[in-house]
Amino acid sequence: MNPMISVEGVDKWFGTNQVLFDIDLQIAEGEMLCLIGPSGSGKSTLLRCINHLEEINTGRIRVDGELIGYQEKRGRLHELTEHAACRQRVGTGMVFQQFNLFPHMTALENVSFAPIKIKGTPKAEAHEHARSLLERVGLGGKAGSYPSQLSGGQQQRVAIARAVAMRPKVLLFDEPTSALDPELVGEVLEVMKDLVRTSQMTIVVVTHEMGFAREVADRVVFMADGRIVEQGTPAQVLDSPQNERTREFLSAVIR
């Protein structure tokens, strides 16, 4: 069976600074994978490359067999237009560190906007689905609230509902709790755990929440200095790491 996400020999530079080095990673359909590692290790950049929010310099990335961000002609890659790249992103949802909600729209409007605008879903149908998703993330009573009227945790839960509203095959989370006050982290993690338990989506999470990774991940990938250093089940990586760099990182973050 072909993987849902295939990253093959990917390098990425920002100017003269190389941030990803020969990344090879295969993620199966329905797999829940956590990317961990120190800040600056390339985790978020890799996630953004999967969604072609960042271009890659070498290698190939495929989602459900489709080459992402580029068209290959005679062995050479040609970057897609922004319009074509946006069409590809319909199948890949992303939840960011900052919530990126439209401030002039209610929670209901934020969640239903993309299905109406991009997929052409009838407004009544999109609103019904949005209401059910807001219920699912524990915000059924906040459909008419604007982002400024919601806590950070509530805004992030709306952002999760918005990503799921497009019914993506792949859902990417870029440190979704890092901008939250500590007391709000748990409510967002509970929503994410529910998604993992109940959905068939392939989910990739960049996180510093080791307890969350241990509880829900099928596989944990440790990155450092732009490279994949170690990967395996949560028990293998978090409890019995084989690489000294992994051990150093975990000793600093797990008390």
Image (tube, helix red, strand yellow):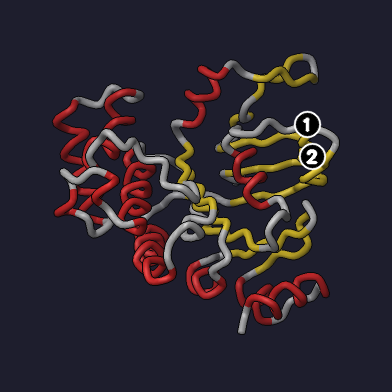
Residue 51 in percent (x, y) is at 57, 36
- Residue appearing at x 61%, y 45% in the figure: 47
- Residue appearing at x 36%, y 40% in the figure: 101
Q: What type is the residue that disc 2 sits on?
A: Asp
Q: Which mark is residue 11?
A: 2
189 with respect to 31 (left or right)? left
Q: CA distance from mark 2 to mark 1?
A: 6 Å
Q: Which mark is residue 48?
A: none
Residue found farthest to the front: 148
Residue 234 in percent (x, y) is at 60, 72
Q: Which mark is residue 57?
A: 1
Residue 4 in percent (x, y) is at 56, 44
**Contact? badges 2 and 1 (CB < 8 Å):** yes
Residue 180 or residue 68, whichever sits in front: 180
Residue 64 in percent (x, y) is at 55, 37
Residue 80 or residue 28, whichever sits in front: 80
Q: Secondary structure at mark 1?
A: loop
Residue 78 found in image quarter: top right
Of label 2 and label 1, which has the lower sequence position? 2
Name above or below for residue 148 compared with residue 113. below
Q: Quadrant of the C terminus?
A: bottom right
Q: Secondary structure at mark 2?
A: strand
